[in-house]
Image (spheres, rainbow, N blue to C red):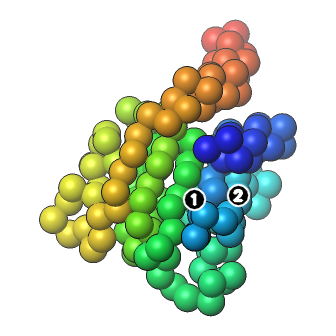
Amino acid sequence: MQMALEQARRAAENGEVPVGAVLVYQDRIIAMAHNLTESRRDPTAHAEILAIREACQKLEQGRLVDCDLYVTLEPCTMCAGAISHARVRRLIYGAYDPKGGAVDHGGRFFQSATCLHRPEVISGVSETESGELLKRFFLPKRNTANLY
């Protein structure tokens, strides 16, 4: 999770929402990514999606059945769908996202009858540190918004 947090810090330094993801296969990191939605002008460039794409290319397969995904924020519906379709074995995430999350909040994608694959989910890992990164990133934006 520390490497995912480092990726999240890199995102924040570049003006991106600080979310980082790391994919592990056989105890080795095979992909790392952070949000790039702003710089790429691509709403699908979430950390999880980018890490899944990189891992699939490295492993030369479309399924990540023996992989674990570490991410600093509870995945949204789009990312939960990608995690399911990629058959990720285990999802470990940090901060809960009551507004946009889809694992333990919102649509609870993995509990849906139409979900193709349900990974093992471990939530709240490094929750405080993950949440603090997000709070520090959004605080100036919220304070500026209140001036108008």
Q: Is residue 129 left or right of residue 78?
A: right
SS at circle 1: helix
Q: Which residue is mark 2?
A: 33
Q: Quadrant of the N terminus?
A: top right
Q: Residue at (35%, 62%) from the top-left corner?
A: 119
Q: Is residue 56 left or right of residue 8?
A: left
Give the percent coordinates (x, y) of residue 94.
51, 37
Q: Residue at (25%, 68%) from the top-left corner?
A: 115
- Farthest-out residue, left: 113
Badge 1: few (under 14), some or many (20 or more) residues near its Cα, within 10 Å?
many
Alpha carbon separation for disc pair 1 and 2? 7 Å
Which residue is nearer to you in this view: 100 or 24?
24
SS at circle 2: strand
- Quadrant assignment, res 10: top right
Mark yes or no: residue 122 visible: yes
- Farthest-out residue, top: 147
Which residue is nearer to you in this view: 89 or 131?
89
Which residue is nearer to you in this view: 147 or 10?
10
Give the percent coordinates (x, y) of residue 4.
66, 47
The amino acid type of the residue labelled 1 equals: Glu
Q: Is residue 114 left or right of residue 144?
A: left
- Quadrant assignment, res 83: bottom left
